[in-house]
Every structure is written in structure tokens, then in C-alpha cells.
Amino acid sequence: MLTLGLPTLGLPTMQLLAATLLLALLPTLSMEVRAQEEPRLRTNAYMIGVGVSDILDTYLSQEHFSGTGITYLATSERSRRGKDWSTLIQHQAHLALADDRAKQFSDLEMSYQLLWGKLHQWQLLDGRLRLQAGGVASALVGFIYNTHQGNNPAQARLALQLMPAATAAYSFRLFRLPATLRYELELPLAGILFSPNYGQSYYEIFSRGDYDHNIVPVTFVTAPDFRQLLTLDLGIGKKTSLRLGYLGDCRQAKVNSLRQHVYSHRFMLGIVKNIRIL
């Protein structure tokens, strides 16, 4: 009768196998150590602002409407120590109530805008000055409601855009507190937006399905938007800052023989939190 058995491994052979396995795992272990040595940095800012709004939509009325509005802005910038690229995410919500010059009719404007982008940074002046440049994608949804109109009282606002972006931030001390002065700018490049045609009703668009150039490609010529944010951060804690600022958001378009603009100017106040994630 034949007996089959497994070969036995001596102590030197087992030591050799263990050493080979350790050498094979060294690259993975070193990558994990490097990942732990490069923590992610996240700066979250939450702001609310009040200011004036100017509204024009010739689909609803030839009148200019002006009034007061509020804006909520949440910003998150994520980066990794030692890396030159960061991710910028912003949520912006507008609400404004504006009257015509005779104070007889009103426009109610609401919108939500999401911005997502990538920025490359340069450190100058021993790290006190940080410059960033890149691009963001913008998605906006909202409406304008006119209290005077009967047949078409509301105008939808839908837009997708690609926008070059740039920031500049300078750090210094103010009243013995760490401070940072920051400026952010986005300009339009190209995109698409929704608009009814001149004299076209929403009933024709959605009930009858009569498409008439309602999805319109736009550029910086036909939709010259302009968005800027100037802020001053004052350190009030180890990882917390008080933020004061000004937000200027000017959205305008001239398509399908219709003109529209919403100009918003806000004085902003909020809190900034710096988070280090391992």
C-alpha cells in the first residue's frame, strides 16, 4: 500500500518564505504610510447675506424690478498636503422680492446654484500669498414669478455653464489676530440654458410639445455672467474663523429676442472651519 504525504518544511525554509512575503508587502506598506503622512485638508465656510437685487425679464414684463434679497452660501475646499490641486464645491441659494418703479407689482425670484471645480495653486511670499486658477462647472435652477401677469406669470431659470475661475488669498495679522483676505472670480465661457421663444407660452412648450429653440447654447457674448466674492477671515479659534464679505452675482442673457438679468449684491457674514482628516 502506498502512502502519500505532504513534504515537511524545515525552519530555514519557513524563514525564507516569511522574508520573501515581507519583501513583497513592503511597497504596499510604504504606500499606506505615505498616505497617512499626507492628510487631507478641508475648509468649510457657511455664510448668509443680505442686500439689493435688480431683476429684469422681458418675457414677463418690460419693467425693471428692484428690492431686497438674502443669499445662503456654503463652500467646501478640499486638498491634500503637498499637492497643488484642490476641489472646490459651493452651494448658493437666492431669494429676492423686488417691486417695480410705481410700487404696484412685484417679482419673486428664487434660485439654487451648484458649483464644482478644480483649482491649481501657487504659493508665494513665503506662503503668505496663495494664487489659484482653474475651472468650475455651474448648474442653476430657479424661477421668477410676476404678480401682474395672468397667462404666463412665471419664468423658469435653468442653466449649465463652464466657467474659468481664479482666487487670490493673502495672510497677515490684524489686531494681533491671524487674518486672510481672499478674492474669488468666475467668468462665463460656454453653456446651455432654457428659454421660451418670443411670444411662446409654456402651454405650447409642455402641453403641446411645440419646441421652438428652447434649449439655447450660450457663450460669454450672449450670457455674460459675472460672479465675485471678496472675504476677510479673522481667526477666533485654533481652527475657526469669522468671515466677513461681499458677494456680487450678476447673471444676464439675451436669447430668443428676450432679455433677462438678475443682479445681486450681498454683504455676507459667516463662519469658517478648518478640518484635518487622516
Image (cartoon, rainbow, N blue to C red):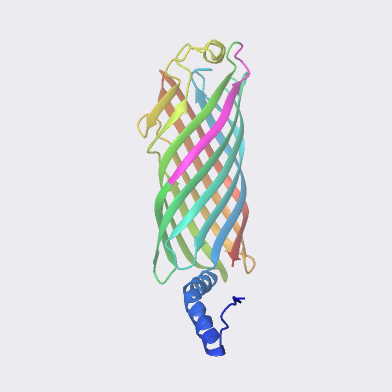
Left or right: residue 209 compared with residue 224? right
Residue 237: horizontal and vertical position, in percent?
64, 67
Magenta stretch holds residue 57: no
Residue shown at 56% from the left, 89% from the top? 11
Residue 6: horizontal and vertical position, in percent?
58, 77
* Residue found farthest to the bottom: 12
Residue shown at 48% from the left, 65% from the top? 171
Magenta residue span: 136-150
* Residue found farthest to the front: 1
Magenta stretch holds residue 139: yes
Left or right: residue 99 compared with residue 228? right
Q: Is residue 67 above or below residue 42?
A: above
**In the picture, which quadrant includes the N terminus?**
bottom right
Residue shown at 50% from the left, 60% from the top? 79
Between residues 226 and 203, which one lies in front from this camera angle?
203
Q: Is residue 251 above or below residue 134?
A: above
The answer, for residue 101, to whether it is visible in the render is: no
Q: Is residue 181 above or below residue 164?
A: below
The main secondary structure of the magenta stretch is strand
Left or right: residue 275 compared with residue 88? right
The answer, for residue 8, to whether it is visible in the render is: yes
Between residues 33 and 194, which one lies in front from this camera angle?
33
Q: Is residue 108 above or below residue 44?
A: above
Task: Please count the marks in the image.
Answer: 0
**In the picture, which quadrant includes the C terminus?**
bottom right
Residue 178: horizontal and vertical position, in percent?
55, 68
Residue 30: horizontal and vertical position, in percent?
49, 75
Between residues 169 and 215, which one lies in front from this camera angle?
215
Residue shown at 50% from the left, 52% from the top? 88
